[in-house]
Every structure is written in structure tokens, then in C-alpha cells.
Amino acid sequence: MGLLDGKVAIITGASRGIGKAIAETFIAQGATVAFTYLSSEEKAKALENELTANGGTAKGFKSNAAEFDAAQKLADEVMEAFGAIDVLVNNAGITRDGLLMRMNEQQWDEVINTNLKSAFNLTKAVLRPMLKARKGSIINMSSVVGVSGNAGQANYAASKAGMIGFTKSVAQELGSRNIRCNAIAPGFIETEMTAELDEAVVQGWRDNIPMKRGGTPADVANTTVFLASDLSAYVTGQTINVCGGMLC
């Protein structure tokens, strides 16, 4: 038996990296996975085939979580397809890095809308089925940058810090209905994006982490499974730093 047997989960931004690892781990733990994609139907179909290859149930939905109406449409389509929404993972995110003096309004708005407004949109969209079922787990993907800040990432840090405040407020509002809301703050996670960086630079980052390695998408995915499962039934309003000790 899997830790997520019988649960239906929506995962945004699951096409690669952390989101893909979460989708794969959820499937392995018995969940039915509805994941979103924004552009490439070919890549989405390939992921759907990969997730269902060994008998799992998964379906890709083309949706822009930064759009309020699109988020509601997604929730309606998932309910129609699977009859429930037990878990929401707000994972979609982008960066538009730059020093504040050079950052323009578009760079600010794009990051806030994709990273923070999307969490509001999707959380609002899944509330009705979760309230009706009197259960649910909402997991927001923040970042250590949202906790500590980072030069050149004012927009990203603001969006990820906002997710932490949003998480705490949602947890307080919905706890009496048995709906939990938690955040995860990954540190330096090695993905296909970091593989393109200079190895000496990456090694320098590793050396500054107490555990002396970068994290893997699986490290974050395993924490997400815990928060989605009944093992964390009395955990809400928390931010778990998956960072190898960066924020000790």
C-alpha cells in the first residue's frame, strides 16, 4: 500500500525538476495525479505516458494558474474527471532575476502573478470540494530565499515570502474544517537548470551547505508526500526547510 492511496492530487508546474519528481513520487505512493502544463502538449503527453506506464492514473491539463478563471476551470475539470481533490501542490514558479534598480514592472508582475497569485487562484478553486469533503492538504512551494532574501531576487523573494504568510493564514482559516496548509522551502536543489552552470560555481555552493551537497528533486518530493499523507494529520501552518542546513 502507498501513503497516498485513494487520494487525488493537483500538481502545478510538473513538467520538469521538482514538480516532475513530486508527480512521479505521488504516483509511486498510489495517488491519482492531475498536473498542469502551459505550452507543450507533446511534453505533457510524454509525462502522462511516463506516469501511467506502470498502472498509475495521471492526466495533464493545459492551464495557466496565474489566471483566476483558468484555475477555477481546472478544478472543475479535475472534479469531473476524478470526483475529488484531496491534495493541492502549488509548485508553479518562475524567476526574472535582476538588481532592483534595473528591475522593470513587467519582471515584478510576472513573478508575483506566476508564483504568488497562482497559489491564491488555485487554493480558492479547490476550497469548495475540500470543504464539502471536510478534508484536504494544500502544499505551497516556497523557497529559502523567501525566508532569508537574496540580492538580485527581490521579486522572487517577495513572492516566496508571501506564500509563507498566505500558508499560515489559510491554515488558521481552514483548520477547523480538517483542511491543512503547509509550505516547503527548498534550498539549493540540483536540477537540469543547475546542470548548465559552471561546475566550480556549483561546487562552491555545495561547500557552503552543512551537508556538503545540493539537494535533489526527490528530497523535496519526499517531504511533499509526507505533508500530503495522513502521516502529517496534525501538521498545519508550518514551513519545512528542505535545505541541507542552509538555514540552521
Image (spheres, rainbow, N blue to C red):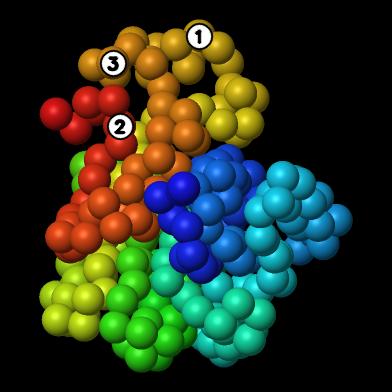
Mark 1 / mark 3, whichever is N-terminal: 1
Q: Which residue is mark 3?
A: 211
Give the answer, above or below, for where 25 lies relative to 175.
above
Residue 42, how many percent across, how many down?
Answer: 85, 56
Callout 2 secondary element = loop
Residue 120, how many percent across, how many down?
Answer: 39, 77
Q: Residue at x 24, y 45 (%)?
A: 240
Q: Residue at x 35, y 35 (%)?
A: 187
Question: Going by the picture, which residue comes out furthest to the right?
Answer: 42
Q: Nearer the viewer, mark 2 or mark 1?
A: 2
Q: Are marks 2 and 3 in contact (CB under 8 Å)?
A: no
Residue 28, how many percent across, how many down?
Answer: 55, 44
Q: Which residue is mark 2?
A: 243
Considering the image in quadrants, where does the C terminus appear?
Answer: top left
Q: Which residue is mark 1?
A: 200
Mark 2 / mark 3, whichever is N-terminal: 3
